[in-house]
Image: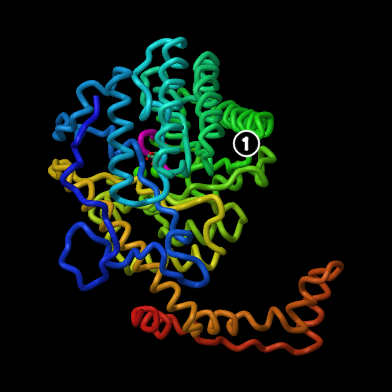
Amino acid sequence: MATDYFADIPTITYRGPETDDEFAYRWYDKDRVVLGKTMAEHLRFAVCMWHTFCWPGSDVFGPGTFQRPWAAHAHTPEGAAMKRDAAFDFIRRLDVPFYCWHDVDVSAHATNVADCGRFFGEAVAHLEQLQADSGIALLWGTANLFSDPRYAAGGATNPDPEVFAWGAMQVRAALEATHRLGGANYVLWGGREGYETLVNTDMKRELDNLGRFLALVVEHKHKIGYTGAILIEPKPFEPTKHQYDFDTATVYGFLKRYGLEDEVRVNIEANHATLASHTFEHEIATASALGIFGSIDANRGDYQNGWDTDQFPNSVEELTRATLEIVRAGGFTTGGFNFDAKVRRQSIDAADLFHGHIGGIDTVAKSLLNAAAIIEDGRIDAFRAQRYAGWDGELGRTIHTEGTGLADIADLAIARNLDPQPRSGRQEWLENLLNRF
Ligand code: XLS
Ligand code: CA
Ligand code: CA
């Protein structure tokens, strides 16, 4: 059962900012070298299986609006295979190097342990073939421990240890499949690892179980020789009222508590950052400062509501600040820009899937060019370095010298009769400068 659903769409190539071609890149020129690397190497774009090939266009007020040829049978092994073929056809035409999946996105629907293993095994063998034929690689795999009704009260944090064990079964299979497919990362997003009310929740026990689960995942990774990165994806709430992996700083505290801070990094999603009342770039800078920056889920929310709308990014201005932080952080190692984004419910055509991705890719690409120009210009970074220059001087070094106590520093302030003067932070000037790019 093949499908020619995307047959009318040409392969998307770079045509430059002046082109009128709507199926072309204006800024993403994959071989163009920027700051010593090609744009493809910097950005490592990925297509996600779930929103793009599994979501039918439904919302809480109504059913799916899309007529994808594979959708009616996607729960059967044949239908799931058609969906995988269609996905690779799409990614090939988009000409991006990576994709991402949840186990349930690529597999037929299973209701028991035996089918779960069999259907997923078939899916992985097929994906291995599709990857070999196309050269498209896996950015990350993950297991869905939130859709099935048995996970309503969580996966690893479920009050019932049998659910924890089911989760372990799924995660072992998904981690081993990621390893077999050469995936660069393995992600854990704890959508239902949180609570609705403390009236029925033993938080201490749930946190300990979540820590135990993560430690087991890390241990298994080493046991099977998987060398990719394990990533946690923070999100403050939705679907649960409060999610334990609230934001990057919270995840770091959790990792420290369970001794996993050198083993696990974060997958930062733009829309989750804004739901947590942070900017996207704040989350990237936090991860970078704490040494746990991993990968990005590119999308955006809507400033007039507080939902996880997962729209394609379209603001170069906002993305420039985020991309600047990524470049400052040294760029991606195992990570990349995964489009965890969905077209709107009225965007029902095959072409709409392309327009969403093309716009998102060009927005990120233009932002990278801006970030590179800002760094090459150097004035913003020079101002920042100058602002902290005192810390490289004698006093700054003394404060950080081992053995220097609070009293030593206080005495020094008295002995030198220090009288520090306020200095302008020049925010408006810096923002004006940034806007020129
Ligand atoms: C949902 C999350 C999810 C993760 C993968 O809000 O973004 O899709 O990226 O489980
Ligand atoms: Ca995500
Ligand atoms: Ca989201």
Q: Position of residue 86 (x, y in %)?
A: 27, 35
Q: Could you say which is closer to the camera, residue 350 or residue 51?
A: 350
Residue at the image point whose x is 69% and y is 40% from the top:
259
Measuring 51% from the left and 35% from the top, which residue is drawn there?
181
User: What type is the residue that disc 1 sits on?
Assistant: Tyr
Quarter assignment of residue 103: top left
Instruction: Tell me the magenta residue range.
Output: 235-240
Q: Is residue 203 magenta?
A: no
Check the image and name the residue furthest to the right: 403
**As drawn, is 183 to the left or to the right of 359?**
right
Q: Is residue 102 visible?
A: yes
The secondary structure that dominates the magenta segment is loop
Q: Residue at x 53, y 19 (%)?
A: 169
Position in image of residue 240 (x %, y %) = 39, 33
Relative placement, left or right, of 136 versus 225 is left
Q: Which residue is mark 1?
A: 226
Residue 237 magenta: yes
Tell me the element at label 1.
loop
